[in-house]
Image (cartoon, rainbow, N blue to C red):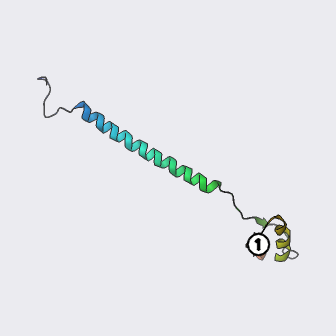
């Protein structure tokens, strides 16, 4: 070592390089976790729904049986929730 460097204050450049590598590794790790979480949320949001929300029909004329007959032509119906006061149904 040269005489102008104090051994108590000298920091090896390889040590600094290691610290920078660890810091960069943590940044990339959190970036990867963020991207993974974002992809997971997109997968959950993009899923197709198997529920139809029907509304704006006359609640005095339309019954649950009528709605069942209309929508059963398009496939099997597992459940129906009929909200008469809102004149809507979840099929």
Is 68 rendered above or below residue 2?
below
Q: Residue furthest front?
A: 76
Residue 63 shows up from this direction = no
- The percent position of residue 27, horizontal first and vertical second, equals 40, 42
- The percent position of residue 39, horizontal first and vertical second, equals 56, 50
Residue 39 shows up from this direction = yes
Count neighbours of disc 1 (C-alpha within 10 A) and say few if under 14, some if 14 to 19, many if 20 or more: few
Q: Residue 80's quadrant in the figure?
A: bottom right
Q: Is residue 21 left or right of residue 79?
A: left
Dividing the image into 4 quarters, which one contains the N terminus? Answer: top left
Q: Residue furthest left?
A: 3
Q: Is residue 13 left or right of residue 66?
A: left
Label 1 residue SS: helix
Q: Along the line of sight, which residue is nearer the eye, 39 or 11?
A: 39
Q: Is residue 20 left or right of residue 4?
A: right
Is 41 rendered above or below residue 78?
above
- The percent position of residue 41, horizontal first and vertical second, equals 57, 54
- Residue at left offset 46%, top offset 44%: 31
Dividing the image into 4 quarters, which one contains the C terminus? Answer: bottom right
Q: Residue furthest right?
A: 61
Q: Residue 60's quadrant in the figure?
A: bottom right
- The percent position of residue 25, horizontal first and vertical second, equals 38, 41
- Residue at left offset 51%, top offset 47%: 35
Is 5 rendered above or below residue 78?
above
Q: Which residue is mark 1?
A: 86
- Residue at left offset 33%, top offset 37%: 20
- Residue at left offset 16%, top offset 33%: 9
Is 10 rendered above or below residue 56?
above
Q: Residue 28's quadrant in the figure?
A: top left
Q: Along the line of sight, which residue is nearer the eye, 46 or 59?
A: 46
Q: Is residue 2 left or right of residue 57?
A: left
């Amino acid at each position: 070592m040269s005489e102008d460097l104090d051994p108590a204050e000298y920091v090896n450049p390889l040590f600094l390089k290691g610290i920078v590598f660890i810091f960069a590794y943590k940044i990339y790790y959190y970036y990867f976790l963020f991207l993974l979480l974002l992809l997971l949320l997109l997968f959950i949001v993009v899923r197709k729904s198997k529920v139809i929300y029907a509304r704006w029909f006359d609640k005095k004329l339309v019954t649950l049986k009528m709605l069942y007959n209309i929508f059963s032509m398009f496939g099997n119906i597992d459940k129906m929730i009929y909200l008469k006061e809102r004149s809507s149904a979840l099929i």
